[in-house]
Image: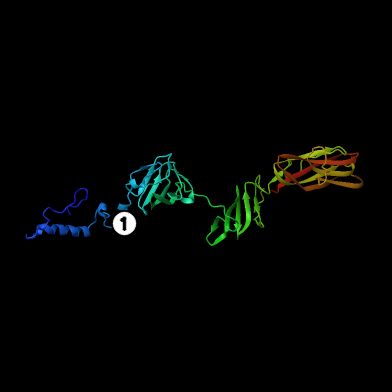
Amino acid sequence: MPRNISGFYSLPPVYLAIPGTTIVAVQHNTPLEDIADTFNYPQPIQYGGTNAATAVAGNDNLTTTSSNLPAAALVNMALATGVNVLISGAGATITSFGTVQSGAHRYFQFDGINTLTHNGTSLILPGAANITTAAGDSGVAVSLGSGNWTVAQYQRANGSIIAGFPNGSAGAPSVYFASDTNTGLYRISSDTIGISVGGVLGATVSTAALTSAVQLIGLGTQTNNDAAAGYIGEVVRGAGGTGFGSLIPLASATPLNIETINLVPGDWDVYCTFRFSADATANYTVRAGSISASNTSLDVSVGGAVVQQRNAGFVAGAHTTYITVGPVRKSLNNATPFFMVASATFSAGAMSAECSVYARRMR
């Protein structure tokens, strides 16, 4: 078929039949053969064909890559030379994609940071909110006609979502399961998430705490090690470690610090065991141990941490006795030292004391 370099077809100069003259083959055989070729061979795109012999090849020929369109208030998709468009440049506030016939698609990609501006009529964006683009972001825009567009798909290059989830509620969580729509996550307030189970709040997570509205059942540790610092179950010990320290001589009826434990902020239970040693000539009537905020006195306040043992008369002879104090709760918002204070009332001889102390974090 005789076409020029632009694909335009021209009939041969002798094709025209003139009344009263003889029709000859050279006039009409060639045009008829050209018509047969038109039906049997791929035709150029500009004349309604796909310039391809298969559907896949034809689709490939029709979905071509455009020359770049600059990022600007108007990114005129009508000027695209193909359906795949790179919007090049940065710093633009894009408000329009121009006017293209309804139903037309443009597959676009950005190579810089711009702002796609949502408009409920002319530029409808996912999430009904502006989008700050990034290099590599891509999407699909569909023309609604009359200069109106909807961005049917938008994919961030880093894989993040375009718009956040709605707040939701316990009965209708915003993040839920297809087969269990009243179980999932929802936003209660700023920096606070609710975990909904069966349409009812099961737990609250905030920057301050995890609060459960139902019974918590957890698997206990399967080892004999202590919990890590800052975790429930953490154990802090005095200088004597897991055992007793060294015996320290006592003066009768004079409280004395035997050991110190330093606690960081938290809610603690403190336990202390005092061991009193009397020599063969000592006689005593009172022994006392205390977990005290003072290193020179027993904590005798209401609800204070002191245990005192009295004897009806003096006890003589060398021997050892024990007093256990605790658990005593210490709820702290500052680092605080506590003193293990021992006291004994005795006559003659000598008495001394030592202790073993530890604290366990409860929360």
Q: Quadrant of the N terminus?
A: bottom left
On screen, residue 237 versus residue 345, left or right, reads left
Query: Is residue 133 visible in this depiction of the protein?
Result: no
- Decide which of 34, 232 is in the foreground and name it: 34
Q: Is residue 13 above or below residue 72?
A: below
Residue 257 location, x and y as percent?
80, 38
Q: Residues within 10 Å of mark 1 (few under 14, many from 20)?
A: few
Q: How is the image coloured?
A: rainbow
User: SS at mark 1?
Assistant: helix
Residue 89 location, x and y as percent?
40, 40
Residue 104 location, x and y as percent?
36, 53
Identify the amino acid type marked 1: Val
- Decide which of 270, 122 is in the foreground and name it: 122
Q: Quadrant of residue 33?
A: bottom left
Q: Residue at x 80, y 48 (%)?
A: 324
Q: Quadrant of residue 264?
A: top right
On screen, residue 207 versus residue 272, left or right, reads left
Residue 59 location, x and y as percent?
32, 55
Instruction: Identify the residue under disc 1.
Output: 56
Q: Residue at x 48, y 50 (%)?
A: 128
- Decide which of 217, 131 is in the foreground and name it: 131
On screen, residue 16 versus residue 234, left or right, reads left
